[in-house]
Image: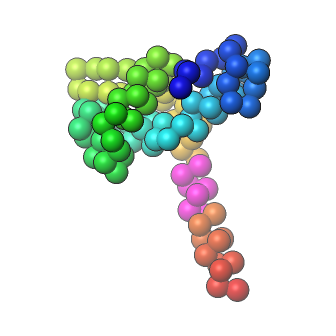
Amino acid sequence: MKLPLPGSAVRGSKTGKPIMALLDLLGRTWSLGIVWNLHYEPCTFRELQSKCEDISPTLLNTRIRELIATAIVEKTCDGYALTRLGNELFGLIKPMGSWSHTWAEALEGKSNE
């Protein structure tokens, strides 16, 4: 699968609008989960694999390479960590975590009706 980059065709955009490239990247299996888990602290490959519910090593390696190539994750002496851009991205994603609890409660209340 081709790396989604702004300026090149990606899912949903023939022109590669930056937001569409980002959504293509983050929509890939486990991309968001990796970003979410790395916001806590840097992780080794095995730690990250465990935090990502035992994602296959092949898929984790692919996603890490993609996130490194897109300047969201970097390799450090402690393992893998979010870059400055990765931390900015997490700041945008974090409110969705709180909202997801509100959403889950609303759906639960709806099913009890």
Report the magenta residues as a range. Answer: 96-102
| Residue 5 colored in magenta in the image | no
Q: Nearer the viewer, residue 9 or 21?
A: 9
Q: Is residue 53 above or below residue 89?
A: below
Relative to 36, 44 lies left or right: left
Residue at 25 percent across and 40 percent down: it is 47
- Residue 19: name its quadrant: top right
Q: Nearer the viewer, residue 40 or 54?
A: 54
The answer to whether residue 73 shows anywhere in this view is no
Q: Main secondary structure of the magenta part?
A: helix
Relative to 17, 79 lies left or right: left
| Residue 101 colored in magenta in the image | yes
Residue at 56 percent across and 21 percent down: it is 2
Q: Is residue 50 above or below residue 91?
A: below
- Where residue 7 sits in the image (x, y, percent)? 70, 13
Residue at 40 percent across and 28 percent down: it is 62
Q: Nearer the viewer, residue 52 or 39?
A: 52
The answer to whether residue 22 shows anywhere in this view is yes
